[in-house]
Amino acid sequence: MLLLTLSAVTPAASVYVVIPGIIQQAGTGAFLSLAAAAVVGLAMAFVYAELASAHPIAGGEYALFGRTMGPLVGFAYMGMNAIGCALGPAVLALGAGAYLQAIWPNAPSVPIAMALIGVATLLGVLNIRTNAWITGAFLAVEVSVLIVLATLGFLHPMRGAGELIIHPVALSGAMLASAPVATIGLATAVAVFAYSGFGAAVYFSEETVGATHRVAHTIVLALLLTVAFEFIPTAAVLMGAPDLKQLMASANPFSDFVTQRGGRALGIAVNLAVALAILNAMIAILLVNARFYYSSGRDRAWAAPINVALTRLHGRFGSPWVATLLAGAVVMASCLIPFHLLLVLTGAGVVVMYVLLCAGVIVGRRNGTTAHGAYKMPLYPLAPIVGLVALAYVLYANWLDPDVGRPSLIATAAIALLAIAYCVVMRRRRGPTWAVTGPTEEPI
């Protein structure tokens, strides 16, 4: 469960794809942004862990919301997540081409993305334990990249950690200037998403022995390891970069840093390892999406023939093979959508999910729907309050971004309305007893 969850988070891809934007925005203030985001991430891990321990269901978040806040909220989010499952992974897959260009100049991003998804889909049909070992092996390569970054940075430090904390600087025109607190705060809103994905553990609960106890600890441990894997190498590069202006102006600061410090051959090897990390992430994410589709079919969310197909299990591997093939097909098709539009359609989805998680754990405590869980977060209700305050700021930061953030909020609101409308129609057809079922329960 831990290997699959960390693979879904894909720390190396987060470092190479997400964190460069944070450095461009906040400069060395990225150190503080990532540190603050880690606090928010820990709060969300506690929230996730308590809900998942009480309801370890393969449907993931929609099942958590349905069990704590009622079927209308659960199934409405299920509709939103169905779109997110189709579009979100395509963003990651399309980024793989940039790292293959080290040996394949002008590599075509769409065919490469589709090929990665195809391989990941075929592997996803295999037994879950087999996939855990496959992703674990790839994860070892991924972590080695981050160790290389940290080693190169710490071996030749140009500045200390105290300088990053007390005097953070950012690029202003062609000069370095003090990074404004507001800029560091806005970068923190992005940094929160660099750590996201640790909640994927809940999707594998039904295939895990003793899930009610293990899923909570896996989620918290996954978050702590993710922070270590992403924060430490980033701090090392910020401390070891010979030229901060060059680092902050680069579109691929970590690739450039490795080439500069370790040579071109090491730079090529690291870029290939990052592309492999993206493949690893695609395997884990498609496994997550397949279990989501499987659970939605079990809950009769679609037309009867679709529900039957989605709940078919492979005779030998025990995997939801039809749901896995569907997960791969819809992501592959999404690669044909313009990249900027994909960002707009998926950018704010995690915010909505986190807000509902915080609300769900509070409601669950009040109505007793999480009382039977094996895990209870420390210092309740501090974690959900910290989460909601931080998410309010993230929403504000997104609204200030006219390019992606604000359109993404509007698009997410439109998708939510469509999902609610679908849920209302299906509820009328299914009747008032339509509810989220679990692994040992028969659909009503």
Image (cartoon, rainbow, N blue to C red):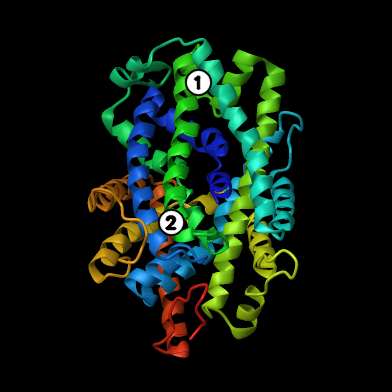
Residue holding disc 1: 247
Q: What residue sits 44% from the left and 30% below the top?
A: 231
Q: Secondary structure at mark 2?
A: helix
Which sits in the foreground, 429 or 307? 307
Residue holding disc 2: 213
Q: What residue sits 38% from the left and 51% below the top?
A: 406
Q: Is residue 368 left or right of residue 35?
A: left
Count the labels in the image: 2
- Residue 426, position as x, y percentages in the image: 47, 83
Q: Which quadrant of the structure image shows residue 333? A: bottom right
Q: What residue sits 34% from the left and 61% below the top?
A: 356
Amino acid under disc 2? His
Q: Is residue 111 above or below residue 325?
A: above
Mark number for residue 124? none
- Residue 370, position as x, y percentages in the image: 32, 66
Amino acid under disc 1? Leu
Q: Which quadrant of the structure image shows residue 372? A: bottom left
Q: CA distance from mark 1 to mark 2?
A: 44 Å
- Residue 416, position as x, y percentages in the image: 41, 67
Q: Residues within 10 Å of mark 2 (few under 14, many from 20)?
A: some
Which sits in the foreground, 211 or 419? 211
Q: Is residue 335 left or right of residue 408?
A: right
Which sits in the foreground, 112 or 304? 304
Q: Is residue 198 left or right of residue 269?
A: left
The answer to whether residue 199 is seen in the rendering is yes
Q: Between disc 1 and disc 2, whose residue precedes?
A: 2
Name the mark nearer the viewer: 1 or 2: 2
- Residue 159, position as x, y percentages in the image: 41, 11
Q: Residues within 10 Å of mark 1 (few under 14, many from 20)?
A: many
The answer to whether residue 241 is seen in the rendering is no
